[in-house]
Amino acid sequence: MKSGCNIEKIQQRSVQKTVKLILMYSIIAIKILNMTYLARISPDESCATVFEESEWKVLYCTANKTKVPPDEPYAISKAVKYVAKLGGFHGCKSDGSPGLKVIWIGLNKLYTLLSYRDFFAMTFLWVKIWERGLVIVPG
């Protein structure tokens, strides 16, 4: 958690803000641990147990550089490998399983991509509304 959150950078905050940040980071760390160890213990479990449908579809498309997501959720072990790939994991035979830091970085990139997708979808919607003249400008 220390290296993923850059704990050193939050030392100048008040105690209350620091406690809230540590609580939030702890929740994120638990999700990462849960996902990582679930993939090691039950590799054939569906990734839908950890990710929402939109998340695992974007993850698949990003990791495999395709525009067509699968119809059915894939195994959690593949999802963790895809997240690790986003985090910089190469997946060579001698590398072993992806570590928590790589998963942390990959999840951060995944949620950034999801935020961009949501932003541009909303922007596209507003452009379509504007083109159709459905926006009433007060004046």
Image (spheres, rainbow, N blue to C red):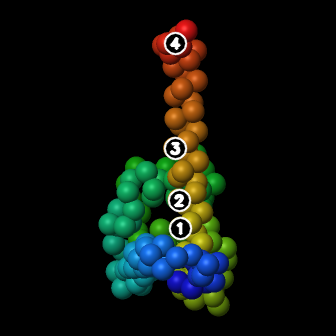
Residue 85 horizontal side relative to residue 1, left or right: right
Q: CA distance from mark 3 to mark 4?
A: 27 Å
Residue type at mark 4 is: Pro
Question: Which residue has dot 2 on it?
Answer: 111
Judge by depth and name the residue closer to the eye, 4 or 73: 4
**Residue 107 disc label:** 1
Q: Earlier in the sequence, mark 3 or mark 4?
A: 3
Question: Percent x, y for residue 80?
Answer: 49, 73
Question: Percent x, y for residue 110?
Answer: 55, 61
Q: CA distance from mark 3 to mark 1?
A: 16 Å
Pointer 4: residues within 10 angstroms few (<14), some, or many (20+)? few
Quadrant hosting residue 24: bottom left
Q: Residue at x 48, y 80 (%)?
A: 15
Q: Earlier in the sequence, mark 2 or mark 4?
A: 2
Residue type at mark 3 is: Asp
Quadrant hosting residue 49: bottom left
Which quadrant, please, contains the C terminus? Answer: top right
Question: Which residue has dot 4 on it?
Answer: 138
Question: Percent x, y for residue 17?
Answer: 48, 73
Q: Earlier in the sequence, mark 4 or mark 1?
A: 1
For the residues labelled 3 and 4, say whether their Cβ atoms are less than 8 Å apart: no
For the residues labelled 4 and 1, say whether their Cβ atoms are less than 8 Å apart: no
Question: Percent x, y for residue 29?
Answer: 45, 79
